[in-house]
Amino acid sequence: MTTRPHPATSASPGLMTRLLRARELTLVALLVLLLAVTGAINPRFLGAQSLRDLLLNVAIIALVVVGQTIVLLMRHVDLSVSSVVGLTAFLTGSLFVAYPGVPVPLAMLFGLLLGAVLGSVNGWLVAYGKVPALVATLGTLYVFRGVDYAIVHGRQINAANLPAPFLNFATGSVLGVPNLVLLVLALMIGFGIYLNSYRGGREYYAIGSNTEAATLAGVNVNRRTMTGFILSGAIAGFAGVLYLARYGTVDATAGTGLELQVIAAAVVGGVSINGGVGTLLGAGTGALLLGVIGSALVTLRAPAFYQQAIQGALLLLAISVDALLARRTARRLQEGSRR
């Protein structure tokens, strides 16, 4: 005897998918409108150099958003990413100072592995220590930054200390598109395919949607949580290396405040703070939207605090929309179960 799924229950994933796509399309429409209006007021905003600088500024944030999205899908959060970016950026620069002939790929691998080690600390605290992610990563945010200050000790890494090929990679481009942007796009596409098409990626959604059900389905929640935080740390570490290549000068304050921009970009882009919902396409669009807003306000010579106010307002709006969608979905499922 076969059991026919109830229409309301079976339709709910399709409904959620349509709502997410509608939200992403709304973000794209808002992005285009913002570019058009700002460009009409100040045509230089749409100039080739302005757009190039905008993409470069967004690239680092968009890269860190990839790791943050993985963590948010599991209904966790990683507040330590800014400190990981700062610490890996300075230590990678120190590596070039101590060993001027070190190959650039090896330096990138160093930053990635260092970030993975730092991410494993968060993963162990959350997965096996059962410390809430908000508390654990808030603590490591300050611990990693404290270690950074202790190592830096008032020093600074300058572009003069870095090899020319490393800096040229950050400033170079292919067909007018910066290398950093192409690299970040490739990584986002790769992780997007992984999350949507492979079992390991789908398990992150399963954990965030219903941890108990995921466990019953055979998902090793602790191991997957550990892996998610390691990936977040590794991506942030790699972003630290690119941060060094992009700006050339780093000190103990490098990356400060980046965690809030990353979380805001992901949530505004449709990644639910309650876990289990969201795409890297939406998260990347959210990062680009916030970057365009910041650049537009600078172009229009608006006070700097407006950028933070708008980011906060968009974050609150996105969370409110998530809560509304969650209630509507739960109501539909309850109505379906009663029929």
Image (cartoon, helix red, strand yellow):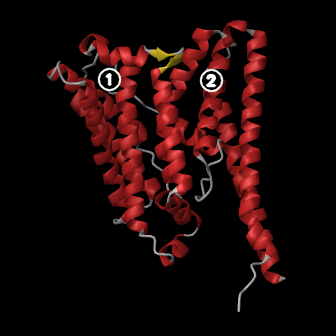
Which residue is located at x 47 percent, y 54 percent?
A: 134
Residue 36 lies left or right of residue 188; in this view the side is right
Q: Label 2's element?
A: helix
Q: Of 253 and 240, which appears nearest the observer?
A: 240
Cα separation, mark 2 vs mark 1, equals 23 Å
Taking the image as drawn, is residue 229 in sight?
yes
Across and down, in percent, residue 326 comes to 71, 61
Q: Residues within 10 Å of mark 1 (few under 14, many from 20)?
A: many
Compared with residue 253, is residue 169 higher up or lower down, i.e. above or below? above
> Compared to 240, does 192 lie above or below?
below
Which residue is painted at 43% across and 14% down in the image?
171
Image-quadrant location for residue 338:
bottom right
Q: Residue at x 54, y 46 (%)?
A: 192
Q: Identify whether 53 is placed above or below 291.
A: above
Disc 2 packing (10 Å; few <14; some 14–19; many ≥20): some
Query: For residue 306, what is the image quadrant?
Result: top right
Quarter of the figure with residue 246: top left
Residue 195 placement, left or right of 245: right
Pick whichever of labels 2 and 1 is earlier in the sequence: 1
Residue ID at (52%, 65%): 207
Q: Is residue 126 left or right of residue 186?
A: left
Residue 316, how many percent across, how many down?
Answer: 68, 44
Residue picked out by circle 2: 294
| Image coords of residue 64 (percent x, y) | 47, 38
What residue does disc 1 label? 251
Quadrant for the C terminus in the image: bottom right
Q: Amino acid at mark 1?
A: Asp
Mark 1: secondary structure: loop
Quarter that holds the N terminus: bottom right
Q: Relative to 229, is 109 above or below?
A: above
Question: Which amino acid lies under the numbered mark 2 shown in the image of this protein?
Answer: Gly
Q: How many marks?
A: 2
